[in-house]
Amino acid sequence: MERTHEDSLAGVDSSIGDDLPKDAIGPHASSSWSDLPTDLLLSILKRLELRESFAFASVCTSWFSAAAAAGIPLTCRPWLMSWAHLVEKRGTKINCSSAVTCKFRNLLDVNKSYDVDFPKGCFVACCGASHGWLVLVNELSNLVLFNPITMEMLPLPPITDFTFVEAVYDDQGSIQGYHIFYKDKLYDAKDVATWFYQKAVLSSTPSKGGNYTVMIIHYDSNWLSFARAGESKWHVVSNLSQQDRYADCAYHDGRFYTVTYQGIVEKYELGGSDGPTKEAIIVHRNEFSCVLTRHLVSTPWGDLLQVKAISAKRVENVRLVINMVHPEGWKKVSPHDLMEHAIFVGLNHSTCLPAKKFPGLRPQCIYFSAPWMAHKIDLMGRCRGWGGARSYDIEKRGFEHAFPIEGMPKSWSMSMHIPSEVWITPSM
């Protein structure tokens, strides 16, 4: 159904014009909304929150122009969402007893941040961002899809659908916690929410009843499961031995792909008549003792790339290496091969964007935010000064902070391996 002007401004304070001169409104009372004078539109914009400003800009061309003049960045560009200020000193837990507020920043104005609120109870952790939607873990350790701009929320199958997870209830019938594999230990639900899910990726947008599939890496980065839109059940497709872990998954050319820390790449066909199947693309295992992360990136020209982070004693010596996934093995990729594109990797579904279409992006640059790396904490401890989203110049082989860093958190040594930010491209 087509959105109306009223739909786009839903939630905007109706008293927004109470302190405006009557002669600024009166002459235009019978005119089209698009004919409102620019100074009036700018006055309205000053009173709007970020998500309301996005809705404002989507009304019509003149309102879009006014939003641009006011410095409101477009929704269709990458933003960094951060919840680092919510991580408690003792480790990973976020206090979700009230509504949670996260910081949104963009590369056009790195010194400015916007507050975006989340409903109570839905945000204990985040494990992904795809197509403008976040994959959040709520206070019961269940996954929900949430659009931070439209406030739409869609539940995914519960954690108790996994056969090795059993809910334990209190006298009032509320979930007290979970037994996971064994009944000799009870895990608090909110604690489970902080570590059970490592990465989630969507095949397509859930907006407008989209027929999406979500794939998750979970438990100890060694389980791989998926669920389709509208389903109440998780389908487990793989679990790894103790010698390896999943590093990333991506949706590319109509299929899901995974890469492990040892460099094994597999392709998954989920819609076959015989059920889910997988095909090994790269089977040679590599030594991964110094590998911090691996990310899979689908490019606009059809290649599937890997971005690998190799640790060093200091963060300025950490290297990011790009290779192309090929049946014959990894193929080296030069900066020229990126064709003036920029890459965004981290907890998000990795993306590759043409820099010329997005002011503020640097070509041949990798924008990196730390994904889940709990089992690599020994390596992280050797990377002094690690933390915060960074840009990596492929030609110069050097890191820079993408945004100003306001001091190092007191709990940095404990929580630097815990994701606290994600790249997201907001969508209406």
Image (spheres, rainbow, N blue to C red):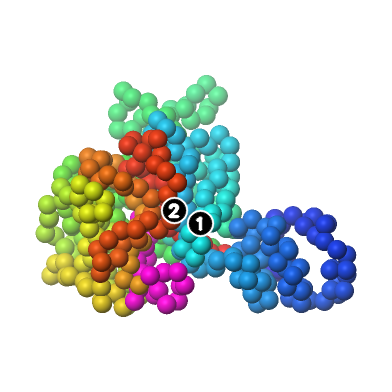
For residue 32, which numbered disc appears in the image?
Answer: none
Residue at x-position 59% and y-position 65%: 72
For residue 404, which numbered disc appears in the image?
Answer: 2
Residue at x-position 82% and y-position 57%: 19
Label 1 Cα neighbours within 10 Å, binned few <14 / some 14-19 / many ≥20:
few
Secondary structure under badge 2? loop
Tell me the kind of residue under disc 1.
Answer: Asn
Question: Which of the marked residues, 1 or 2, is nearer the chain's N terminus?
Answer: 1
Is residue 391 highlighted in magenta?
A: no
Note whether 134 is above or below 328 in the view shown. above
Residue 289: give x, y in percent of width and height.
Answer: 15, 47
| Residue 345 horizontal side relative to residue 381, left or right | right
Secondary structure under badge 1? strand
Residue 93: give x, y in percent of width and height.
Answer: 43, 35
Cα–Cα span, label 1 and label 2: 7 Å
Tally the marks. Answer: 2
Q: Report whether residue 48 is seen.
A: yes
Residue at x-position 35% and y-position 72%: 363
| Residue occupying the far top of the picture | 171
Is label 1 in contact with label 2 (beta carbons under 8 Å)?
yes
Residue at x-position 68% and y-position 76%: 62
Between 103 and 306, the residue placed more toward the observer is: 103
Q: Which segment did they paint magenta?
A: 340-362
Label 2 Cα neighbours within 10 Å, binned few <14 / some 14-19 / many ≥20:
few
Dividing the picture into quarters, in which one does residue 407 lie?
Answer: top left
Residue 178: give x, y in percent of width and height.
Answer: 40, 31
Disc 1 designates what residue?
A: 111
Tell me the kind of residue under disc 2.
Answer: Pro
Between 280 and 33, the residue placed more toward the observer is: 33
